[in-house]
């Protein structure tokens, strides 16, 4: 966590030329590692906007983390979480595929899935793009409103599945170029939403599966509240000691 905080301190220097600037921190995040943290209300949830089924190992990791947080003095509940409507996914894909729009590049040099996204963007009208962006903003406001009101931090799995083997997404050379994006859904089930809301979130390696793979859990916080995440994550680092562990070689 000391490394994480140091990297964030370097990255978070205000950019006066940026269109949007995050609030200035009171002190470096490196000073928040190990700092006292009052008891927090933490919501544990396995619900995902993408509807992915969570494997037993990922559930177990999240429950292990929840127990550790309670031992540290925090309150963990499992009340229902207000998640965005899955119908929001097309709006996300519309804006996501438009990332490369307007960028000079040779489309034929792109990998097939990126080329397909570029072509989808070129076929999307500016009106559809603007509507998708506004829908994401409206949904983001409703989702973020829960943080600091109903609970302080959200605990969930990081992935819905154990890490797959390298190359798994592109194993079939004849597959539709859009297939890898759909196949990757279980790996983005709990993380993609924060690409929309812009909230800080962190993945912590609290568990190891029977096959020897690391299994992470995710903590998400209120906008611009990296301080609380760093403090709580450093509490869990003391409990689990992941900085001293090495995954077995296969």
Image (spheres, rainbow, N blue to C red):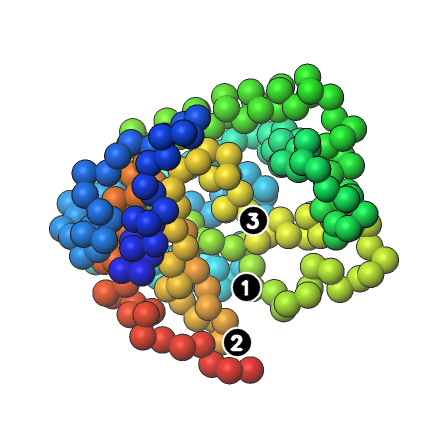
Q: CA distance from mark 2 to mark 1?
A: 9 Å
Q: Nearer the viewer, residue 173 or 68?
A: 173
For disc 1, the marked residue is 162
Q: Please determine whether, in this image, residue 194 is positioned above or below residue 237.
A: above
Residue found farthest to the right: 174
Question: Label 3, on which residue?
Answer: 188
- Asked if marks 2 and 1 touch (Cβ < 8 Å), the reply is yes
Counting residues from the start of the chain, the first of labels 2 and 1 encountered is: 1
| Quadrant of the image containing the C terminus | bottom right
Residue found 73% across the figure and 21% down from its top: 125
- Element on which disc 2 rests: loop
Identify the residue at image location x=48%, y=60%.
58
**Residue 35 image position (x, y, % from top left):** 15, 52
Residue 6 showing in the rendered view: yes
Q: Residue furthest bottom?
A: 249
Rendered view: 138 above or below 5: above
Q: Residue at x 68, y 65 (%)?
A: 167
Q: Are circles 3 and 1 on residues that touch, CB within 8 Å?
A: no
Q: Nearer the viewer, mark 3 or mark 2?
A: 3
In terms of depth relative to the viewer, which is nearer, 168 or 10?
10
Q: Callout 3: helix, strand or loop?
A: helix
**Structural crowding at the residue carrying mark 3, measured as other residues with C-alpha within 10 Å and reported as few (<14), some (14–19) or many (≥20):** some
The Cα–Cα distance between marks 3 and 1, rounded to whole angstroms, is: 12 Å
Seen in the image, is 202 located left or right of residue 120?
A: left
Between 82 and 170, the one nearer to me in the picture: 170
Q: Which residue position is annotated with label 2?
A: 211
Q: Which one is in front in this view, the residue at disc 3 or the one at disc 1?
A: 3
């Amino acid at each position: 966590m000391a490394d994480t905080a140091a990297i964030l301190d370097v990255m978070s220097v205000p950019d006066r030329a940026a269109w949007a600037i995050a609030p200035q921190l009171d002190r470096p995040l490196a000073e928040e590692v190990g700092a006292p943290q009052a008891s927090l209300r933490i919501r544990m949830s396995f619900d995902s906007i993408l509807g992915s089924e969570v494997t037993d190992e990922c559930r177990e990791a999240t429950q292990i983390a929840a127990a550790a947080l309670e031992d540290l003095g925090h309150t963990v509940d499992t009340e229902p979480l207000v998640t965005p409507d899955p119908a929001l996914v097309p709006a996300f894909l519309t804006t996501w595929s438009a990332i490369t729009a307007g960028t000079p590049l040779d489309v034929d040099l792109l990998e097939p899935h990126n080329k397909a996204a570029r072509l989808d963007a070129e076929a999307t009208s500016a009106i559809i793009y603007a509507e998708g962006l506004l829908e994401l903003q409206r949904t983001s406001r409703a989702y973020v409103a829960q943080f600091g009101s109903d609970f302080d931090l959200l605990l969930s799995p990081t992935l819905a599945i154990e890490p797959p083997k390298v190359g798994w997404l592109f194993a079939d050379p004849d597959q539709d170029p859009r297939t890898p994006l759909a196949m990757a859904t279980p790996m983005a089930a709990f993380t993609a939403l924060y690409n929309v809301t812009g909230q800080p979130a962190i993945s912590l390696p609290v568990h190891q599966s029977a096959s020897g793979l690391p299994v992470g859990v995710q903590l998400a916080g209120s906008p611009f509240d990296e301080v609380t995440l760093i403090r709580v994550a450093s509490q869990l680092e003391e409990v689990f000691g992941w900085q001293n562990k090495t995954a077995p070689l296969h």
